[in-house]
Image (tube, grey):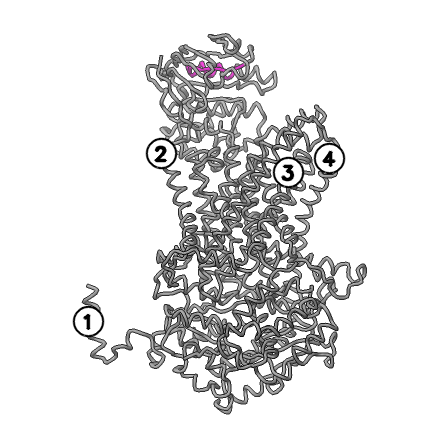
Amino acid sequence: MQQIAKTRPLTLADVTIRLAERTLLAVSATVMPGEVLTIMGPSGSGKSALLAFAGGFLDPAFDASGRLLIGKVDVTDIPANRRHAGILFQDPLLFPHLSVGGNIVFAIPPSIKGHNARRALAGQALDEVGLAGFFDRDPETLSGGQKARVALQRVLVSAPHFLLLDEPFSKLDAALRQQMRELVFSRAKAAGLPAILVTHDSADAEAAGGRVIEIGGEEKA
Amino acid sequence: MIGRARKILMAATLTLGLAGEASATDAGNWDAVVAEAKGQTVYFNAWGGSENINAYVRWAGGEMKSRYGVDVVHVKLDDTAKAVATVVAEKAAGKNDGGAVDLIWINGENFAAMKREGLLFSPGWATKLPNWRYVDHETKATVLRDFTIPAEGLESPWGGAKLVFFHDSARTRKADLPDSATGLMKWAEANPGRFSYPQPPDFTGTSFLKQVLIELIDDKTKLQRPIDDTTFAADAAPLFAYLDKLTPLLWRQGKAYPQNYPDMKQKLADGELDIIFAFNPAEASSAIANGELPETVRSFVFSGGTLGNTHFLAIPYNATAKAGALLLADFLLSPEAQLRKQDPKIWGDPTVLSLAKLSAENRSAFENLDLGLATLRPDELGPALDEPHPDWMTRIEAEWIRRYGAAN
Amino acid sequence: MGRPIRIKALQTGSHGLTTNTLLALLLGLPILAGVAGIILPAFGYLPALGGLRFTLSHFAELAGQPHILRSSLTGLTTGLATTCAAVAITGTFVAGFAGMPAFSRIQHLVSPLLAVPHAAAAFALAFLVAPSGFLVRLVSPELTGFTRPPQWLIPNDPVGLSMVAGLITKEVPFLFLIALAALPQLPLRQSRQLTAALGYGRLSGFLISLWPALYRRIRLAVFAVLVYSVSVVDVAIILGPQLPATLPVRIAQWTADHDLGARFLASAAALLQLAVVLAAVVIWLLIERLGRFGLARLTYSGRRLRNDGVPRLVSAFVMAACAALIFLGIAILGVWSIAGLWPFPNALPAKLTSQTWLRTLPQLWPALQTTIALALTAAALALLSAILLLHRNGADRGGNGPRYRLLYLPLLLPEISFVFGLQILFVSGGIKPAFGSVLAVHFLFVLPYVLLSLSAPWRELDPRFERIAAGFGRSALQILLTVRLPLLFRACLTAFAVGFSVSVSLYLPTLLIGAGRLTTIATEAVALSSGGDRRVIGVYALVQASLPFLAFLIASLAPQLLFRNRRAMRT
């Protein structure tokens, strides 16, 4: 459902993030469509702050400099809700007040009009991950793996320009984790999305198969 | 524009020969009052602490609506002075018409204050009311002089009041009951902790102080005049000597007091007090009927007389619905309304009308009222002692608070 | 190198600051004006009564009032005693039990108390503990030998102990619930484990590790309790000393004095009351300092204080007793409302009758309608404003930001001091006492509580929900309406119910601004309480107490119905 032609590379140009005068990280990288850039580091290293910077919701306590480009467009000063960042967190964070299908419909861009068309698209998205017939279910009744798949499909139907993955597999059990890694990375590649993965698990980085930047401590990438 | 409109109006009233009267509501022109009142809403500010009185006001409101098309809203006060305060606040804000209060249930010091500050609808209108002709202003002096202050028609009489004592005949024998303030002291010595009075400045409480003052002062005529500062200490000395002696014999040794009459009534029912008193001779009967007091409660008075007064209705100078207020005041003075008011099953307040002036039919209706087993007949009520000048009340209240206002 | 930039938080609009300053001023100004409205008459300026010249004579007159010092001091000491006790009980209980099963049991018992109007709670207590009250009746004459009520000096004892007891039963639940809202922000479990591992008792461990942070978060509420207890009128009338009464009660009497000149005196006294409140605040600041000093001593002494069973049990007992007393008292109010003759020492009335209800209901009905209309509108407006404020500024600043301090003025200033001035202001402005003006004043009092109630859940909502939605391209307003508000549906309803309850219990503002034209259950109940008829008081107190319960019941049932197919939304 995602046109590869539309996706463009994501560039972090001299991005430096500081907290109280202390430099946490400095990154320069361009992530090509379909590529996953992995940022690895211990907690407190500022890797989540980098995601927040890219997503447009960095806490004002941090000082950030540098630019964020999508293709050639500078989106550094664009508010979060116009950046089209698709985010996956540790938790699936399905909206508990909506049905499973409602969660997906909520994410579909407004350019797709008509109740039936939107519903059909959501149904198709559920179908793709083996959740056909789950449309009217309460998200709370789903298993952990099912929730994770809904969360993934929800991000993908929103037609994001890039993906931000904030340790999305860390709370899954081992078997499920491997399954989800494959699913997420294959679908991200298929959609031709540039993605930034933040993790402290080197198995994640291996599965992602892209460049790895290690941050934290005295190391600078 | 406004100037021209006013000129046209002036011309119109002049040609009609109504100049000077058209601008104000006039009780002398009753048909005009009735016509003007139709559709008005009268905000009747009256003490709302008694459910049977509230029910009576509700009844009157219903009658006013069906007979005259006047809406009556009972603004229930816990203290009449609150209504006075409202008028004061309005005057402070320069709100000289369209005021929030249309009719006030009033007497004594509140009336004196409003009269003094020019807060009353004037000139006098009460004696121009159609039902004034039934009022007993010949034998009931308090109808014309409210706590010695001349009413001058600025307030219309509504009902009478007289201090009456109650006791529970199951606990206290009739033979042991006191017959004077001095007798009450002896009784209290024999029964410590079983008598008290509402804490001044509660109205019923100060009435008790006035009763004692009237009985004990050397020259009763002094009480009809404002206080003479040079002799006040000596004049009041017997009262305070009496209270000094009585206080340790009171309920809780005078370290706390009942807050008002209904509080005393509850304490009589609970057995905390043995003798209580009220300013309404029918109170005991209606309390028995309501299950608030046992059926063994009876009334008594002092043979030397007890305090008596009249309560009134007054209209603020800035009232919005003056015509409606006049109409309501007149209706409440009608034989029909007064009869209901005296009926102990409804209220039980003595009428201000003269039975002699009523039609034979109305007269016999009054005479045939069943006053209830705890209510004294009019001829058993004993002499009425006149209210002192309001000055006395204010000073005695202040002095009481200074002396007894801090329990240790 | 790009120029240094600051990323703006998602919700902070660039106009947020001015909007909120304006809003806070709009709400704070009437209160400041109300204060001005007493300052002028206090110095002799009230043209309608011939007061045209500035003078200090009214303060001299005030000083000459009998027992004025004692009145001021009893108000001050009862207020301070109430606050000390309430903080100590709440603190000990939270420290001793937070995180334990007993905690949630007591929590469920105590929470509904917040909804009971102060006057109804005071009546409930008085009906129980008076010498002729239910508790003595229960054991008389069998155990006590009393066939007539004993001559005990309660309630209304000269020192104000019964008043302190009455206030504690209401203020402890208030502080407790505020503390409850702040607790999730603290690392409770970790600190507990740490201090336990170091060998500290539950109380001392909590005191050292968490209390300072918790106290910071409930401090505003503590000051609200202090100011309220020092200035309370209705509870003081019902339970407080009468010889002399506390200063606020005497001011209330002076504002209604037959001698019209007493308005000046009342204004001067209202200023004095402000000074008393200020003194109470200063003393409290000293107590805080002492507390900090004591805590520092304890911390550095390293004493473990493991034997803290007694204070913990006492605090739990007091918490439970607060609830038990009020609920039993309300039940007794209910029995009185259907009682026929009920002489001492009978534990139950000899006869039951529906007469009181039948007699009272027709008269109660219009007041009930006004009460509900006022409470619904005030709570709805306050909820809307609170959502707006929190949306523009975020919860962190909403709770503690300096711009919001004005909003809390109604809680931090004695009611009697500014509502009286506000009355003059309203009349001067030609504003007729009507639904609108009373509603405006209710709004002033309701908003702070609604804001307090909503800001904690607002802050605690996982921000990642909104980040995800922003990633989907939703606007801030869309996110508010489709994500945040639905997720906070229950919290909004609870805040609404809180606002509703506050409005239902407002007496003085309704009376003064409504000028008696707008009667609510609260004004009717207090007017009737001067009539002392326990049966009618029973009816009114029961109705007044049940309204907030109804609101909270709806607030807890509505999510069950609306989200019956969404498990996570029902709890």
Question: Dot 3: what SS?
Answer: helix
Question: Dot 2: what SS?
Answer: loop
Residue matched to label 3? C91
Q: Is residue B205 left or right of residue C496?
A: right
Query: Of the residues tagged 1 and 3, which is closer to the observer?
Result: 3
Q: Cβ–Cβ below 8 Å for labels 4 and 3?
A: no
Q: CA distance from mark 1 to mark 3?
A: 76 Å
The chain to which mark 4 is attached is C
The amino acid at mark 3 is Gly
Please tell me which of labels 3 and 2 falls first in the chain.
2
Please tell me which of labels 4 and 2 falls first in the chain.
2
Query: Of the residues tagged 4 and 2, which is closer to the observer?
Result: 4
The chain to which mark 2 is attached is C
Up/down of B262 relative to C94, above or below: below
Both marks 4 and 3 on one chain: yes
The amino acid at mark 1 is Ile
Residue C147 image point, x, y percent: 77, 66
Identity of the residue drawn at 36% across and 12% down: C1
The chain to which mark 3 is attached is C
Q: CA distance from mark 3 to mark 2?
A: 40 Å
Evaluate whether residue C331 shows in this view. Answer: yes
Mark 1 surroundings: few (<14), some (14-19) or many (≥20) residues within 10 A:
few
Both marks 4 and 1 on one chain: no
Residue matched to label 4? C308
Disc marking residue B37: none
Query: Of the residues tagged 4 and 1, which is closer to the observer?
Result: 4
Disc marking residue B8: 1
Mark 2 surroundings: few (<14), some (14-19) or many (≥20) residues within 10 A:
few
The N terminus of chain B - image quarter = bottom left
Q: Cβ–Cβ below 8 Å for labels 4 and 2?
A: no
In magenta, the rendered stretch is A182-199
